[in-house]
Image (cartoon, grey):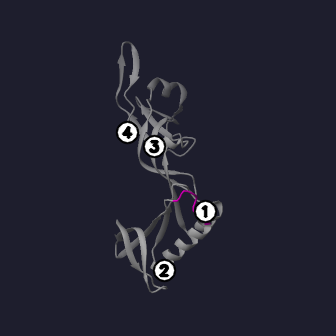
Amino acid sequence: MTHNVKLAGHDSETLRQVDVLVEQSIGQFNMQIVIDCKDYGHPVDVKGVEEFAGLVRDVRAHQGSMVCPRGFTKSARKVARRANIGLYSPADTADRTPVEMTVSLDVMGRRYFGHLPLAEIRGLRDEHTGAVHTNAFTTGILSAVEVENEWQRLVGNEEPLAPVALLIMGLDCIAIEGRRRSALAGRA
């Protein structure tokens, strides 16, 4: 990954500035992803997306993505989807971004499916799908008793009702003062 790069424009025959260039060799192919970062106080409009799509074509990148903390207008999202441009805005629970995660949990050889409360999450929100891409989040406290009483128990090879985003193995359930507790709270 390289920041503030100048790439040769094939059609424009001039050097084009790219905020972030990601290069990866896959077999005999060299893949290039260009990322444009906009720190605007307003959503990026259709003109901004069209200009960036032109840059992506001009430098012959395999993929282009834009990041803007204020998001993108509806028409900008439509144009970006048709041009295969990824659109992202930072997601942070400090901004009160609603987050829901589905989880599969194995407790004492039993499987359960339910929603895990997230205390914090930081990442990038995909402006096309609404999904948040993250590698850092903090869960709330997960009680084995709550899981057994409120989550769906999966029997045999039964599939959960929705796709599973996280699999947790409940390996550390202990009894303290006659009450059952679980040490299943953590960071990923």
| Start-end of magenta stretch | 40-45
Q: Earlier in the sequence, mark 4 or mark 3?
A: 3
Q: How many marks?
A: 4
At horizontal 45% and vertical 39% (from top left) the residue drawn is: 120
- Which numbered disc, 4 or 1, marks the residue that appears first in the sequence? 1
Residue placed under numbered mark 3 in the picture: 121
The Cα–Cα distance between marks 2 and 3, rounded to whole angstroms, is 36 Å
Label at residue 159: none
The residue carrying mark 1 is 77
Which of the two discs, 4 and 2, labels the residue nearer the N terminus? 2
Q: Residue at x 47, y 70 (%)?
A: 63
Q: Could you tell me how far apart the alpha carbons at marks 1 and 3 are, in whole angstroms?
A: 24 Å
Residue that mark 4 sits on: 187
Q: Residue furthest front?
A: 41
Name which residue lies at 43% across and 41% down: 167
What amino acid is at disc 1?
Arg
**Which of labels 4 and 2 is toward the front?**
2
Going from N to C along the chain, the mark reached first, 2 or 3, is 2
**Mark 3 packing: few (<14 Cα in 10 Å), some, or many (20+)?**
many
Q: Nearer the viewer, residue 17 or 81?
A: 17
